[in-house]
Amino acid sequence: MLDKIDSRLLAALQKDAQLTNQQLGDMLHLSPSQAGRRRQRLEGEGYIRGYGARLDPMRLGLQVEAFVQVQMASHDPDRVAVFARTIQTLPQVVNAWILTGEADYLLRIYCESLSDLNRLIQRVLLPIPAVARVQSQIVMDQPKADAPLPT
């Protein structure tokens, strides 16, 4: 179970994963070693899955962000496995979710251009035998960036 200090520690690390144990201790009114032990425990228990840098897609030349819904023609495990392996190998697919409802999968994709997105859909996704239909939505703007999880 998480206590209030754990929740505050997690919230602080979501805002700035580079906080030192000293900084965390100061924020949480703990010694640096106590803050460090709590961080290690939360990492060990799987509350903290990792640390990473948030990159700016536009600065990297990734001008197009899209959400692509994929409806499967077949749920045969072997055919679905081919689809799953394919999306795992595509660097443009940064997230993939299995859904309830009409679409079976939702993919978050970054590409350099609309032409690149079109090629990915037409030449990679649609030819997969298990795929029946693909529908894409192009992101026009992001009024709320990826936010920290509520703690």
Image: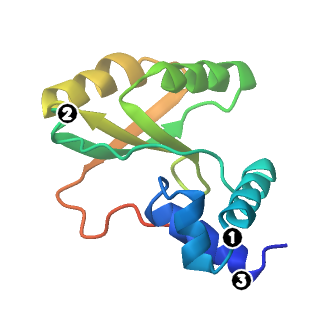
Q: Would you say residue 149 is visible in this rendering?
A: no
Which amino acid lies under the numbered mark 3 shown in the image of this protein?
Lys
Which amino acid lies under the numbered mark 1 shown in the image of this protein?
Ser
Q: Is residue 17 left or right of residue 124?
A: right
* Helix, strand or loop for disc 3: helix
Q: Is residue 105 left or right of residue 94?
A: right
Residues marked 3 and 2 touching at CB (< 8 Å): no
Give the mark nearer the N terminus: 2 vs 1: 1
Nearer to us of marks 3 and 1 is 1
Q: Residue at label 3?
A: 4
Q: Position of residue 56 (x, y in %)?
A: 24, 45
**Above or below, 89 relative to 59:** above
Its colouring scheme is rainbow
Residues marked 3 and 1 touching at CB (< 8 Å): no
Q: Position of residue 107 (x, y in %)?
A: 44, 42
* Helix, strand or loop for disc 1: loop
For label 2, count other residues whose C-alpha is less than 10 Å away and answer few (under 14), some (14-19) or many (20+): few
Real-space Cα separation, disc 3 to disc 1, in angstroms: 16 Å
Q: Residue at label 1?
A: 31
User: Farthest residue in the right direction?
Assistant: 1
Instruction: Say which mark, if any, is on residue 86.
Output: none
Real-space Cα separation, disc 3 to disc 2, in angstroms: 39 Å
User: Going 39% across and 61% down the picture, which residue do you hit?
Assistant: 146
User: Going 44% across and 60% down the picture, which residue do you hit?
Assistant: 16
Q: Quadrant of the N terminus?
A: bottom right
**Above or below, 78 relative to 148:** above
Which amino acid lies under the numbered mark 2 shown in the image of this protein?
Leu
Nearer to us of marks 3 and 2 is 3
Q: Residue at label 2?
A: 60
Q: Position of residue 62 (x, y in %)?
A: 20, 35
